[in-house]
Structure formats: structure tokens, C-alpha cells
Amino acid sequence: MDPECSQLLPALCAVLADPRQPVADDTCLEKLLDWFKTITEAGSSLQLLQENPCLVELLCHVLKPQGLSARVLSFSLRLAGVFAAQESCFQYLQQAELLPGLFGEAGPLGQAAWSAPTVRSGWIQGLRSLAQHPSALPFLADCGTLDTIFSLQGDSSLFVASAAGQLLVHILGLSLQRPAEGPPSPQACDWPVCAQKIVGHIEGSLRSMATPQVTQALNVLTTTFGHCHGPWMQVLWERLSPLVACLLQEDPLPAAHSLVDLLLSVARSPVLSSSDCGLWETLAQTLRRLSPAQAGPLALGILKLQDCPQALRAQAFGVLLQPLACVLTAADQAPGPPGLPEGTTGDSVTVDTLLSSKSACAGLLCQTLAHLELLQPLPQRPSPWPQAPLLGAAVTILRFCNGSAAPASDVGGRLCAILAGCVRVQRAALDFLGALAQETGPQELVTQVSAVLLEYLRSPDSSPTVLKKAFQATLRWLLSSPRAPGCCDLDPDTQLFLRELLPVLRKRLCSPCWEVRDSGLEFLTQVTRHWGGQAGFRHALLASEVPELAEQLLRDPESYVRASAVTAVGQLSSQGLHATAASPEQLGGQKESLLAELLHVLSTDSEGFPRRAAMQVFTEWLRDRHADVAEDTERFVARVLQAASRDLDWEVRAQGLELALVFLAQTLGQPSARCPYAVAAPQATPPGPLAQALRALSRVRLFEFAFRALFDCDRPVAQKSCDLLLFLRAQATPSGGLQEAEGSPDVVPVEAALQRWRAGEQGEPLGDLEPEAVLAVLRSLDLEGLRGALAESSDHVEKSPQSLLQDMLATVGVRGENQADCY
Amino acid sequence: MKLYCLSGHPTLPCNVLKFKSTTIMLDCGLDMTSTLNFLPLPLVQSPRLSNLPGWSLKDGNAFLDKELKECSGHVFVDSVPEFCLPETELIDLSTVDVILISNYHCMMALPYITEHTGFTGTVYATEPTVQIGRLLMEELVNFIERVPKAQSASLWKNKDIQRNSGCSMEDGWECRDGGRKTRLLPSPLKDAVEVSTWRRCYTMQEVNSALSKIQLVGYSQKIELFGAVQVTPLSSGYALGSSNWIIQSHYEKVSYVSGSSLLTTHPQPMDQASLKNSDVLVLTGLTQIPTANPDGMVGEFCSNLALTVRNGGNVLVPCYPSGVIYDLLECLYQYIDSAGLSNIPFYFISPVANSSLEFSQIFAEWLCHNKQTKVYLPEPPFPHAELIQTNKLRHYPSIHGDFSNDFRQPCVVFTGHPSLRFGDVVHFMELWGKSSLNTVIFTEPDFSYLEALAPYQPLAMKCIYCPIDTRLNFIQVSKLLKEVQPLHVVCPEQYTQPPPAQSHRMDLMIDCQPPAMSYRRAEVLALPFKRLFEKIEIMPELADSLVPMEIKPGISLATVSAVLHTKDNKHVLQPPPRPAPPTSGKKRKRASEDIPDCKVLKPLLSGSIPVEQFVQTLEKHGFSDVKVEDTAKGHIVLLQEAETLIQIEEDSTHIICDNDEMLRVRLRDLVLKFLQKF
């Protein structure tokens, strides 16, 4: 600790110990604690305490019942824990009777302050910090501390309860960790006292069969098996697994969710899953025992395991597929749905769950669909993957939800009544259907998928969120559709689908609901990006009036829609699909008008989103050398940069720098494959073309834009500008270069302007800049230093421990003065 | 308590409730779907309609060809349109005491009832209901009277022809009846319901006379009917001034729910809480299109409107002059700018267009909270005021006059009648029907759009069906019933099964416990509860004289001697007149005859007899051969030797012995020991 801080510390400790001077700001105490942690990590805590006796005094003060504020009390407990984490310091505090005082019955535990959750939390965290060495164990075992922790597991504050559980896990791990002696014996009497007590408590809780206790015990075990990896884990599991097995006999099953978590945690633990300790049988039994909704997460967990017996995997997959099998049976009348793994028929328990209530039905189906969606892309997913029945199930669920399914049975009829109009299930099923587009299916089913997607896109009853999902799923299916063999264009089915889809899209773009217009535009952008080059798509789109509508939406009252319209129109234009591109005689004039329109958006739109979208479109156009841009690139860049430089939205300015960088790279002949930020090893640009290029940059006022951005009040903009200028400097002044050839240019006006901008003045354009002057300024600027400074967090200047201590004292001082004034 | 069901139309109900001593008609709906069987009434001479071929039978017999015309395979009656009235024969309508109206659509048959059945009672309705109802009737009368039709067809309604037509057959042209060919009407005329009750439209004079019988009421106002029942209108959230009704006596409550909505449109929200604890809930007027949600339909309406106008086409919206049109105009007000439709003119054509738009702005107290607060700003509650001000919306009484000067295309026209059989809409159908650029968008759910379009076939214009019905759907009904928990639900039979076209949709029917009782036209339902109690008031001075005796903790009894006075269905116990002081013998005698006997009689008994103890007591008193038998209602104690039996039941005890009065009195005294006297 530096001497300045040492000097301030006694005053601060006195303030903290004074109940009349409450500390208003929690964050100060947190920062103070962080600071002490860094100090103790770097050196001896004992020495720190000895050199700063005020700290021990502060801790002693806590022992006196003086009505210290809860936060100071909590802070002191945690501070004591931080110090006692070192064994020497622990002994020192033990001898001073401080630790038993703080953490034992005599401390806050017995005081009124204990009712504050923050004190209880501080107590736990203090113990958590000090429990780092074996000598802490007798302390924990002796003075009833463990019993308090046990009771805190059921604390009314969730944070305290959870921390208590974590602490037990930590203590158990610490006490059983005996690397030299090998695994502990299975006999409990040989275990350390702490471990005996904790395990005894867990056993007691498991035997109690009361849900809260069982949940607590299972949670502790789950964390233990998830975090600790000693050989003793196996011993522990062997000892406890009979009790867990007993739980499975109970009806109703207590704490089913926690039980699932525990079993999965055990199964994932490398120590246990490799050994044969009856785990797989327990898992299989649990799968049979749990209700369909509870079994889902367990089944998914089992299927995600790397090494697991095939039979168990098959059983788990069967459980996961149960609800979908029920749906298929309800719709199909067939005895068992074809294509599902054997034994997967809708059992009566699942059917009962599905029919019990609307929320239960929706919950189970959504969970199942989400689980299967998660499983689908995994390499360890079951094989063969029942793609066809899954597709069938998704389509059937969607049909039940929109009332178009013809149920074959009584169950189907009731399912239809429950699911009709259920938005939650619709969304989940559409998501799942989209995920299934990774692979195809039988043609008949694919046709059904297209039909049901069209139904949803067409239906006036589809809610905006459902519609968005329907658009997303449609896009995934469209993009996965196969190309006709021997031809690069779309296959006839897809073309047919498109012909039906585009009128729907057209209507959706006219929807009074802005979310619908927005998702319609997003869909249009995506599909155009992927298929802009396909003749079939181009033909259908241009005949559909959709491009005109998209352009109309540039003037939408809703800013999100305008932004999406800008992106969509930009994409259409990139692909030559812009509304007016169809009439070749008007080509020039009309195209200019789209550019003008987007520039208009950029310079006048009142909301940030459309302006950002416009900048992105412009950058993309420049990068792709869009025909409009290529006509007069310099004029284009100059106009965009001018508009961007005035923008109030920092993202627009940052995007402006992105565009400037693209232009820079193009002008200086940067090979596009290279990362523009890679400053090292620049290619030398020959001096003649370089001068020309620099003059071009000057003409579009790129330098002025970049220099202004360098002093931007928003850090990301300044950082980006810094990177850009560094890149420019490296590009333009490769060892030697221009400077010797030209002599010393006049840099005074530039530097004066930079000074003004740095001071925060914004006016006064720089005028035309001589490239040489720019290079000279670039060389003179400490860009690396600036970059370093910008990389620091914004409060780095003020973040010294000394200033923290001063701040805390100052606040108290001000308070004191105010109080004096009052008197 | 009985319910007479006079209409089979679930959303245009007409029921009569007999409750205590009152006869109450609930709504007075007029089924106008009958007009779909008639040819449209064109405002301007239509060569197409007047040149339609007459209909003749297969064998060439053309005796109906003056009355029936054929158009694209459909047959229509060429006559003044007629409406299907509620049943008038099921119950003598002159006995109806009051008519309760729930909304302006459900009062259209009122003139038929009040003017032609001997009705002498009162009609109750809210002010907006009456005013807008008047507008609807006025429009209807105007539409029909301004196109006088020389011909009035009646031959086709001839009973013989109708009866033979009832013979069900696939193609409907003829059937063999004992070897003889019987001439039949074509479908759908042969399926038409109750053709004999169809009547031509009423006159304005009848309308005025009917409306003069209405008494205005406000929400939650309690109206006493003859002291026997109290009726109260509650906000139903469906239309301006629309109400549900509570009909209650002291111990019974009947709720009448008709045309209610839980959506936040313009009217005041529905009052659900007051419907709780009903013995019977009569549920009518649910949405006619349970599968279409109004929000989605409004979206569909706007999108199609924009697409048509963008392509240079015109949009025709057949509609009523009040109701959903206010919401549509409000939606369009927000939508037209976003869709770039600011320059498109909107026309609203109806003889009552002006009144409707203006009335809507003055009924502030009947509007939803949002709109009410606007009035205090002050701003007009509906934004159509601004549309009118900025000339985006213009209204005209008819296509004649100013409209023809201002008319500009492409445009959007709102006009009536939604049946497409009369009103200015007929003209626009003829005018725009030939171009596929134009679109007709149906928003009113009352008429099948395909049937409405039938006489205009072949039709090139696009037809969009987006019915907007804000009334309760089945999910909302099921929530409502869970919330208000009536003991019994009564509803039209259509609501107790899924719609015929979607028989698998079990969710599209009322699902409640016990199952709803259903009714159909011309049925009389005995409502499933009995009246058990009647309230009687006790005059204060009489109450003062009572001496209650507590027989159990919390239960006290007292005997009352009083005169029961009943007047205006109210019952009051008054103190008995004091016995007159004895005067002359003759007079005294007469007085004693008049005055009820108010001597204190035998004491009253209460309590129950514990059989075991009773038997012990009997044995103590020397009865040795006591046997006890259990019966369904209690016990029989047998004294075999004495040939006597004591029947002990919950509310009576009988001692039966043969002429042994001594024994009877002995036993009676033993029984009395177990009972309290007061």
C-alpha cells in the first residue's frame, strides 16, 4: 500500500466505525473491498494488518453492539474474510478472538442487524473467502457455523439461500480435498468432521422427503458434482445414490426438477460417468418415473451426453418424441405414427397431460419442440434422425393451431379445441419447422410444409409475432430448396411457391401493423440477397409490384419500417431489381433518384435507424462498386461523408468511417482480401499514383472527416478514426516515401484546426488540404498514444485507490459540514 | 318462469320472458336475410336487371315468370323486398308489459310489434340506441320507398306451392307425388323459413309511432316493473348505448346478455361484475364469425383497400351507417398517411350519413374512457371529424345531387345496404362490377357475401370478405361464464354445437356446466328453477312488539300475528287492528267476526327427538316392548303391546293409537319433554 493511502486509511476506518456518519454509497464499499482483495493477493495480509492497526480496530468495532449500519457490517465481515484467506492472518485473527466474534454467536448473528439480508450475505461471503486452507475447517466445524449455514439454505432472500448452498459445496470440497492421501474411505467415520456434518445433513434432508429440504440437498449435490472433480466424488455418490433412488419411489416425486439437474450433473461428471455405479439404471428409472413435462429436460440432457448406453439414448429419445407421437396419432388415426423409433407411441400419461389444460398442453408442446430444435444440429443427435415424422408433427401442430386440421379421433378433437389460436405453440412450431429446413423430407411433406407456411402467411388471424416466425421459416425452407438438376435456376416447385408467396408479401407490405410491414421487408431483403441472381426469382419479383411497395415504405411513419425499407431497397438496387430498373429508357434519371432518396433519408430522417441503414447500404454499394456509385464515386463519397459528419448519431458517424475506409482501400489499391486494420507490413504504394490517390481523398474531404472524428465525443468513433488514420499513415508513408520528395509542407492551418477541434469547437471547415500537409500532420500526431488512451476505460484517470479514499472521506466531510450548518 | 322464443336468429333475438307476474320481451330483432331472395332495387334504371329472363318450369310452364327472375342460375323474386318477422302466434303479444332493447340492431322489428299486435306497454332503451336505431330505420324506409316498385309478388308464397316445395329433393325442380308431377320452387326459395310471416317494410309514420313508446334509460338505472321485478341496463361494450339487462326480484336474478364485446373499440366497456350470481343467464348475440378475429380483419381490410387504390381501382364498402364504420374510419385515419393514400377521397353515402357522423360525437358519456377524456380537452372524440374537416372524408345523402359533381376516381365509398338489395350500393355494384381493378370489401357479418353478390353475377370486380364482428367469441364466453358463474345458461341452439361447416371445431361452441339449455324459433322453455321465497316487509311498530327467543346460538324465533297487506306486488305485515271496545252485543258480534282471531294459541315447538333417549324414557315409563324401525324419512317407534306407533320424522311427529286418548296424551307429553316451547 502506498504511503498516501496508509495516511488516509485511519480516518476512513474511523468514519466507517462511526454509526453517526452513514456511508451513502454501496459502490464505494465494493470498490474498497476490491482494492483490499488486490492488495492481499499481491502481498501478506498479516503484514497489512500489522502496518495498519486501524483495520483491526475497525473489525473490533463491529463486535460492539453500536448500531452500525447494515452495509458497513456486511462490508466488515467480508473484509475479515478477505484477510483470513491467508493462513497466517487467519491464525492472527483467531488469536485476537476476532473471527469467533465476527462469525460466531456473539457477532452479528445474534444481533438485530441479522435481519438485514445484506448482513447475512456478508457473513456467508466472509466465510466463503476465509475457507481457503485446512486450518479453517476446525473453525467452521466447531462454533456452530455449519448449522447456521444449513438454516440459511432456506433463507427468505434467494441470494442468501443460494450463497449458503454454494458455501456448503465449497466447504465440502475443501474438507474432502486431500491430494496426498488418495480417496477417502467409504466409511463416514473416517471423514473430516465438516464433511461428516454436511453429508449427514444432506442425507437427513433427502430422507425427510419434504420438498424444500430435498430441493436444497439436491441443489448442493448438483453444484458439487458440477464443480468438483476429486476421486472422492465417486465415494460420495456411492453413498448417496441409494437415497436418491429412494426418492424415486415417492409419489408425488419431491423436487423433480432439482433431481433432473442432479442426475445430469452426475452423468456429466467425468469421474462418475466412466465408472459403473448404477447411474444409467437410475437415469432409465427416472425417465420412466417422471411426468412428461419433467422428463423432457432429462431426456434432452441424456441425449447430449457424449458417452451413454445406446438403450438409454433410445429411451430418452422416445420420451422426447412422446408428445409429438400423440399429436400425430390424434391427427392420423393410424395405429402408430410411421417413421418414429419403435416404441414411441403416444402413451396415455402424455395424452392426459396434453388434454389436461391449455397451459399444460402449450407448455409441453413448446418444451418438446424447443428441445428437439436444440438437438437437431448436434453431432451426437440420435441417428437415424426421424426427419419425416418430425416434419409431419410440426405441420400437424400448426394445422391444429389454425383450426385446419381434421382430427381423426376424440383426442384430436379436444386437442384441436385446446390449440386453436394458441400463439405460443404457433411460434414454437414455426421455429422448429424452420430448423428442420436443414434437411429435406419426402416431397409430399415438403409440399405440405409449403402449404401450411402459405396458410400462416395468408391468414389475417396470424399475429405479428407469428407472422415474423412464419416469414423466417419460409426463408429457411426457400433457401434450402434444391436447384433443378443441371440448371442453376430455381426448381419448378419453388417457382410455383414464389408465385403464390409474392402476392401475400405484397399484401403484408400494406398491413396497417408496422411489425408486419417490417418483417415483410426483412424477408424481402434476405430472399433477394440470396436469390437476386436467379432468373426465376427476378422475373417473379419484378412482375409482383413488391419493389414499388418497398420503395413506398421509405416514407413510412414508423422509423423501424423506414430502416428496413432502406435496407431492402438498397439490396434490391444492388441486384438490379429496383422498382424502376425495369424501364431501361429511364435508367439513368430514375436510378439517380433512388440514390438521392437515400441521401435524403440520411440527411433529414429524424430517427437514427433509417440513417444507420442508409449508411450501411451506401457502404455496401461502394464495396460492391454499385453502378450508381461507380458513375461518380468521388462525388458520392463526398456527399455521404458530408451528411454523415453532421449526424448526431455516433453509429452513423462510425459507419461513415467504415465507408471512408472502404474508399481508402479502393483508392490506395488495397487488395480486398487483406484485413484493413492490419497495419503491419503495408505494401509500398508507388509515389506517383499515391499522390493522385491522396488528392482524391482530399477532394472528397475524407481527411477532414477523419480528423474531426478523431476528437469525437463518442469513444468508438474516435477509436475507429484512429485506426483509419494509422492505416492511412502506414499505407502512405512507407519508409521514406513522399515526404523527402516534396519538402516541408505548410501544416500550420491543419494543426490549428485540430487544436480547435480537440478543444471542442466544431465550426470552421478545413478547406482543401494539400496531401503533403496531411501526411506531415499524420506523422506529427501521436496516433498510437491516442489509441492506447482511447482503449482505456473512460474512468481510468480517476480510478486510483487514493482518489477512492479521498472521495469517500470527502462525501462524509461534506455531510459533516452540512450537519454543522443545520445546528 | 318461461321463455318464449320468437326468433331463430341468434344475433337478432326476440324472446319473451314470463317472470313473476310480468311479461317482458327481450329485444325485437328483424331478420333481413330474407331480402337476399329478392332482386336488387336499382336507383337508376338498370337494363341488365330489367331484362332478366323470367323463371319457368322444366315443362315450360311459366305461371311464375312475372314474379321470379333468373340470373346466372339463381332465381330471385322480382318484388319489393320483405323481411322475416318474429313469431306472432306463439304468445299473445298484447300481453307483453315491456320490451327491453339491448342495441340498435336488435330493435328493427319494433314497429311491427308495437303497431300491429295490440301492444300497450312501454319500451325501454338507452338514448344512443333510440337515436341510432331511428337512423337505421329511417335509412331502411328511405332506401325502399324512394324506389317505388309497381309489382308486389305474392303468388310464389302461395301455400300450395310452398308446401310442395318443402319436399326435399336434390335438384329441387320436381318430384313425383303419387305419379303426379308437382310443381316446385327452386332453391333457395323452397328452403326459405316462415315465408308466410314475411312482411314489407314499415312506413316512417309507424316508425315514429313505435319510437314514441320508448322510455329512455341510463346504465345501472333501476326500473321497477309493477313492484314485482326490477330491470337494469348494463353497458355491454358492443355499440354506442348497447346494453345487457338484469331482471331481478328479491330472490331471483335473470341476466340477459345480448351483443356484448370485450374489445376496446369506441363504446363504454362491458360491465361484467353486475352479471354475477344469476340464476339464469340468457346468452345471445355472440360473434357470427367466430374464426375471424377483428384485428386481423381490419388489417386485411386496410391492405386490400390500399392495394386496390394503388392500382387505380375503386373500393366499395357496403355497410350500415353506424357502428363498425366509426372504427374503420378511425383505422383509416391512422393508416392512409402510412400507405400514401392521403389524396384518395373517401365518400360516405347514406340518407343519414350526416346525422350518424354528428351523433357519434355528442354521446360522450356512452363512449370508452379514452374518447371521453378527449371531450374535456375539448376535442371531438372520433377522428373522423378531422377527416371531414380536411376534406378527406365527404358525406352525401345519396348519389344524386352534390355527389355527382364532386365524384372523383379512384375513391373509396362507404354506403348501404350491406345486403346489396337496396340503397346506393346497388348503383355502385352496377357501375364498378365490370372492372377487375375495383374491389368490394364486405365488413358487415350479417349477410353471406356470396348470396349478396348472386344477382350481380357475372362479376369482374374483386370481392374481399373481411367480416368485422366485435361481439364475444367462444373463448371470451367461456371466460365470462367462469367469472360470473350463472346457475343455468340458456342460448340459441346454434351455440351448443360447432358450426356445420367446421364440425371438428369443438372450441366453437359453448362449453359450460351444467350444459347450456338451447332454444329454437317457436319454442317455449320452462326455465329450470323454482321460486322459493318472497320478501315480506314488517312495519316498524309491529317489529317493535316482537319478542324473539333464542333457540340456538344465533337463531331466534318469534311469533307474529299480523295482517298481510298486498298491493302492487309488495307484501307488508301490518299490526292487527286492536279489538274494538265492547259496545252493544250486536255490534260486538260483528266486530269479532271481522277481526282475525288473535288469541295466543298453543305454544310452538322446536327441536328434534333423539330416538335412543326417547326409547329409554319410554322404558322408564313402563313401556317394555319398544321396537325401533328406520324409515327413509326418520324412525318409527313401535309399542307392540299397546298396538301403537310413533312416527318421528324431520318436520312432524305422529302418534297413532286406537282410541286410547289417555295413552296418546301420555305419549304426547313424553314427546314434548324433548322439545322446546315458546
Image (cartoon, rainbow, N blue to C red):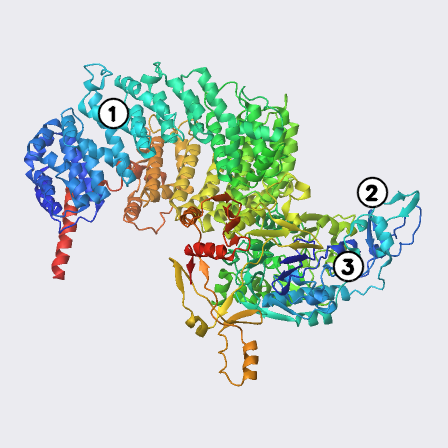
Work out whether residue A449 or residue A518 is closer to the camera in this orientation and state it: A449
Instruction: State how far apart marks 3 and 2 are (Cα).
Output: 24 Å
Identify which residue is drawn at 77% across, 59% down. Answer: B197
Work out whether residue A360 or residue A302 is closer to the camera in this orientation and state it: A360
Q: Identify the mark at residue A199; answer none if there is no mark.
A: 1
Q: Mark 2 = which residue?
A: B169
Mark 1, secondary structure of its residue: helix
Mark 3, secondary structure of its residue: helix
Q: Position of residue A498 (x, y in %)?
A: 63, 34
Q: Is residue A21 left or right of residue A121?
A: left
Crowding at mark 2 (Cα within 10 Å: few <14, some 14-19, many 20+): few
Q: Is residue B659 left or right of residue A608?
A: right
**Would you say residue A684 is visible in this rendering?**
no
Q: Amino acid at mark 2?
A: Met
Q: Position of residue B21 (x, y in %)?
A: 62, 65
**Would you say residue B438 is visible in this rendering?**
yes
Chain holding disc 3: B
Question: In which quadrant is the N terminus of chain B drawn?
Answer: bottom right
Chain holding disc 2: B
Tell me which corner region of the image, top left, top right, bottom left or bottom right, holds residue B215: bottom right
Chain holding disc 1: A
Identify which residue is drawn at 81% across, 65% down. Answer: B148
Assess whether mark 1 and mark 3 are in contact (beta carbons under 8 angstroms): no
Work out whether residue A788 or residue A258 is closer to the camera in this orientation and state it: A258
Assess whether mark 1 and mark 2 are in contact (beta carbons under 8 angstroms): no
Q: Amino acid at mark 3?
A: Thr
Q: Identify the mark at residue B197; answer none if there is no mark.
A: 3
